């Protein structure tokens, strides 16, 4: 008897109850692994610019390196980009991409050969100005996945990630506006990083969200601190309250 794409509603409730992207990604991977043998996942929002990483998790390690490399270097050559461009706004798509379909050698080596992934299974939803994409990675020894179940899980993931992305947006926008008004010397990137620091995000979390390395985030933040004449993160909030 087939399960018709259903999975444990208690697990779904725990997933949607996650309050941050990393916990959400961890719980999502737990469900995907237990139901379909998925070893890694990656979700992002993409428009005309560099993809914005929404969630990434892996049972193998080094997922942040692969996610950043994809966002910075590989997304244009990814076959899923063709599926996304061919989908009209207000519609979804699903595609399975085997490792041998990846023509760019550096991409295939880092994201498929080294972690021994045989394929990735992608689900996306296209809007007028951007698309949400959830990708599940399978290793070579994995069983055939239940596509209906993975599709239902991807739909739930998009819903949860959309809610998480919307909730802090007004605060971040307000903080960035205050920084722009009070300290026009800061660049747009410095304002993005300072606003997220005030919101309590770690350098690693900021890097994953903005597709930057941790060292790059720290460099931007240190430059902003120097411009503001402060030395630690606790001073940031006081700086925008003056």
Image (spheres, rainbow, N blue to C red):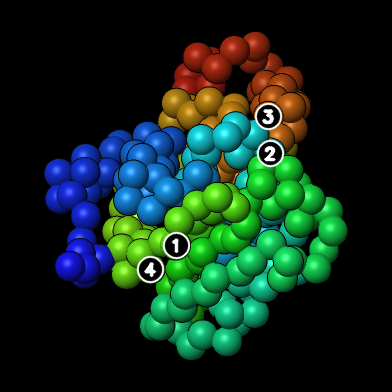
**Numbered mark located on residue 147 in the image:** 4
Residue sticking out furthest to the right: 105
Residue 223 position within the rendered picture, expressed as x and y whole percent measured from the top left: 75, 26
Asked if the residue under mark 4 is in contact with the one under mark 2, i.e. CB atoms within 8 Å, the reply is: no
Residue occupied by mark 2: 65
Residue 144 position within the rendered picture, expressed as x and y whole percent measured from the top left: 44, 62
| Image position of 224 (left or right of 54) | right
Residue occupied by mark 1: 144
**Numbered mark located on residue 214 in the image:** 3
Q: CA distance from mark 2 to mark 4?
A: 27 Å
Q: CA distance from mark 3 to mark 1?
A: 36 Å
The local secondary structure at tag 3 comes to helix
Question: Which comes sooner in the sequence, label 3 or label 1?
Answer: 1
Residue 55 visible in the displayed image: yes
Q: Quadrant of the N terminus?
A: bottom left
The local secondary structure at tag 2 comes to helix
Question: Which comes sooner in the sequence, label 3 or label 4?
Answer: 4
Q: Residue at x 68, y 39 (%)?
A: 65
Judge by depth and name the residue closer to the eye, 36 or 130.
36
The local secondary structure at tag 4 comes to helix
| Image position of 164 (left or right of 72) | left
- Give the answer, above or below, for where 17 lies relative to 52: above
Question: Which comes sooner in the sequence, label 3 or label 2?
Answer: 2
């Amino acid at each position: 008897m087939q399960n018709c794409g259903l999975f444990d509603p208690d697990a779904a409730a725990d997933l949607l109850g996650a309050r941050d992207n990393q916990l959400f990604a961890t719980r999502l991977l737990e469900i995907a692994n237990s139901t379909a043998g998925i070893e890694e996942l990656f979700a992002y929002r993409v428009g005309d610019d560099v993809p914005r990483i929404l969630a990434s998790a892996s049972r193998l390690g080094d997922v942040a390196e692969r996610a950043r490399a994809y966002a910075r270097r590989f997304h244009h050559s990814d076959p899923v980009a063709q599926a996304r461009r061919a989908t009209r706004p207000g519609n979804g798509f699903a595609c399975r991409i085997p490792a041998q379909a990846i023509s760019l050698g550096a991409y295939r080596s880092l994201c498929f050969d080294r972690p021994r992934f045989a394929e990735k299974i992608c689900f996306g939803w296209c809007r007028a100005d951007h698309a949400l994409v959830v990708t599940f990675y399978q290793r070579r020894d994995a069983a055939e996945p239940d596509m209906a179940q993975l599709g239902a899980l991807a739909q739930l993931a998009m819903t949860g990630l959309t809610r998480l992305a919307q909730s802090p947006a007004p605060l971040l926008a307000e903080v960035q506006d205050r920084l722009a008004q009070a300290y026009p010397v800061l660049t747009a990137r410095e304002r993005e990083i300072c606003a997220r620091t005030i919101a309590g995000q770690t350098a690693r979390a900021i890097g994953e969200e903005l597709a930057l390395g941790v060292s790059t985030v720290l460099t931007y933040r240190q430059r902003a601190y120097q411009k503001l004449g402060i030395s630690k993160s606790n001073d940031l909030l006081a700086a925008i309250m003056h």
